[in-house]
Amino acid sequence: MLALAGAAGCGSKKDPPPPPVPAQPVELAPDDSACKLVTKEDAAKLLGHPVGDGAIGKKRDPAECVYKSDSPAGSSVSVMVYSDGQEGLRRTLKAELLGKDPVQLPGIGQRAYRTADGTRFGMLAKGKFVFVSALSADSTGPSAASAEGLVGVLANRL
């Protein structure tokens, strides 16, 4: 059977199909990295309703992006990307996750955490630390499952 497979390929004038192109990481520039890493679609999926375009923050480290929703008013997704991953992890764990029962997410990046309610999560990968905070003005806010799903996507993008 193996000989037939090899013979079928011999003498063929057609070029073999190119190998599939692997998913490329997102190219991150300092000023827009947070908005490229977490897209408008990602933010809408996390909140469970549409959001506006991302507004780039004034800081460069951490790079910031905020997606706001008009329905319900007051809902938003905030993204911060720290170029020094270890420092970002330390600051975020202390300020944002401490006392909120962080859940470690094994197998994602070097370290990944989320709060029990899924409204905040962070991930250390490729020397960067990404922190996402989702605030919903209604009960349809983010779930722990949607937060974990997005963390996995972000790990692949880095």
Image (cartoon, helix red, strand yellow):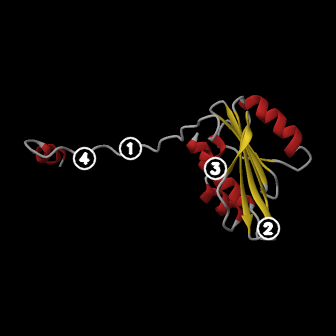
Mark 2 or mark 1: which comes first in sequence?
1
Image position, residue 62 (x, y; %): 74, 36
Q: Which residue is mark 2?
A: 73
Label 2 or label 3, whichever lies nearer to me, is: 2
Q: Secondary structure at mark 4?
A: loop
| Residue 157: percent from left, percent from top | 56, 43
Residue labelled with disc 3 = 38
Dot placed on the residue nearer the N-terminal end, 1 or 3: 1
Alpha carbons under labels 4 and 3: distance apart: 33 Å
| x, y percent for residue 88 | 77, 34
Q: Nearer the viewer, mark 1 or mark 3?
A: 3
Q: Secondary structure at mark 1?
A: loop
Is residue 6 shown above or below 84? below
Residue at label 4? Answer: 17
Q: CA distance from mark 1 to mark 3?
A: 22 Å
Callout 2 crowding tier (Cα within 10 Å): few <14, some 14–19, many ≥20: few
**Residue at point 82%, 67% (across, down):** 137
Q: Which residue is mark 1?
A: 21
Say which amino acid is labelled 2.
Ala
